[in-house]
Every structure is written in structure tokens, then in C-alpha cells.
């Protein structure tokens, strides 16, 4: 390039461009295969699969996680789950993610309300200030997501203290 040559005409450039294109295609096929296998396994093993309707656009605002999030293909995965559920006669639901990680599945207390401190992303384990139940954040969220999907979720505004 410094000598004024056009890179598009350079043979080594073209060879390298093809190698990189092959690597990208291989990675794309591996990701696609992984998503296909995982979605099929989940749908075949379970009669009901419930997932949060996560907004990838909002998640990409976190610059520390944006590369990993964009690589995953979450929307594609949810679409695979939806069509495979229909194919296998199973049920697939997406739910609103509001309060799924901040709510105690035992008593319904929502962190960040009624004088409770709101959980931060780094808080992976916590104890409910009302019922003293110890929670692992991801496990608690999974229970809340399932409850929302089954319809047994209590609306936090209808709770009596």
C-alpha cells in the first residue's frame, strides 16, 4: 500500500481474504449447529419452555458485554425455539423480563422498592430483607420466569404488606 499498489490486485491479499472468509463461514456454521442442537434438545425434553423477551438493543448498551451478546444470536435462538415447539407439539412462551431478577420468588418482595436496595449486576447472591430467603440470582430468576409462564406470578402492585 505504501508503494502505491492496489491491494485488490495483490495475490497475497486475495489469498488471505479467502482464508478469513472461510474461517468466518466455519464459525457461523458452528454457531448455527450449536443453536439447532440446543433448541431441539430443550424442546424435546420439556413440554413447556419459557424465556424472557430480552431486548438485544438494550443489552448492547452495556459495552462490557456487547460483543458477547451480539455473537450469541439470542433472537435467532428464540425463533428456533418457537418453530420447533410448534413442530413437536410443545409449548413455548416468552414473557416480559420486568422484575424477574429483582423479585424474591418466596415472598414476592421486589428489590429497589419499599426501602430495599436495588440489586446490581454484580450481585450474584442475595438474601431477601423480608423473608430472609437466600437466593442465587440466576436460580431465583429462573423460578420467577417459570411462574410468569405458568400464570402463577403475583402482580407486585396487588401485594399486601
Image: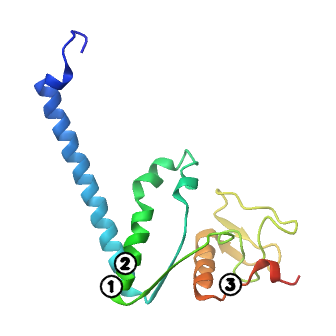
Q: Which residue is mark 3?
A: 153
Assess whether mark 1 and mark 2 are in contact (beta carbons under 8 angstroms): yes
Assess whether mark 1 and mark 3 are in contact (beta carbons under 8 angstroms): no
Left or right position of 53 against 77: right
Report the mark closest to the observer, 2 or 3.
2
The local crowd at label 1, few if under 14, some if 14 to 19, many if 20 or more residues have their Cα within 10 Å, is few
User: Which residue occupies the foreground of this view, 158 or 46?
Assistant: 158
Q: CA distance from mark 2 to mark 3?
A: 26 Å
Q: Quadrant of residue 138?
A: bottom right
Q: Is residue 38 above or below residue 90?
A: above
Q: Which residue is mark 1?
A: 87
Residue at x 44%, y 52% (from the top left corner): 70
Residue at x 64%, y 57% (from the top left corner): 121
First in sequence: mark 3 vs mark 1 = 1
Q: Position of residue 152 (x, y in %)?
A: 66, 89
Residue at x 19%, y 35% (from the top left corner): 17
Q: Position of residue 129 (x, y in %)?
A: 81, 72
Q: Secondary structure at mark 1?
A: helix
Q: In the rendered image, which quarter contains the N terminus?
A: top left
Q: Is residue 69 above or below residue 38?
A: above
Q: Does the rendering let one see residue 132?
A: no
- The circle drawn on residue 83 is 2
Q: Quadrant of residue 127?
A: bottom right
Amino acid at each position: 500500500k505504501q508503494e502505491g499498489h492496489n491491494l485488490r490486485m495483490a495475490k497475497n491479499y486475495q489469498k488471505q481474504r479467502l482464508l478469513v472468509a472461510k474461517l468466518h463461514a466455519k464459525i457461523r456454521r458452528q454457531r448455527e449447529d450449536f443453536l439447532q442442537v440446543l433448541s431441539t434438545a430443550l424442546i424435546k425434553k420439556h413440554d413447556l419452555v419459557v424465556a424472557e423477551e430480552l431486548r438485544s438493543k438494550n443489552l448492547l448498551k452495556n459495552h462490557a458485554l456487547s460483543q458477547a451478546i451480539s455473537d450469541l444470536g439470542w433472537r435467532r435462538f428464540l425463533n428456533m425455539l418457537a418453530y420447533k415447539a410448534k413442530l413437536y407439539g410443545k409449548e413455548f412462551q416468552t414473557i416480559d423480563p420486568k422484575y424477574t431478577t429483582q423479585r424474591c420468588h418466596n415472598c414476592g418482595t421486589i428489590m429497589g422498592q419499599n426501602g430495599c436496595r436495588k440489586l446490581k449486576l454484580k450481585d450474584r447472591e442475595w438474601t431477601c430483607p423480608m423473608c430472609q430467603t437466600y437466593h442465587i440470582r440466576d436460580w431465583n430468576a429462573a423460578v420467577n420466569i417459570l411462574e410468569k409462564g405458568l400464570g402463577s406470578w403475583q402482580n407486585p402492585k396487588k401485594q399486601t404488606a
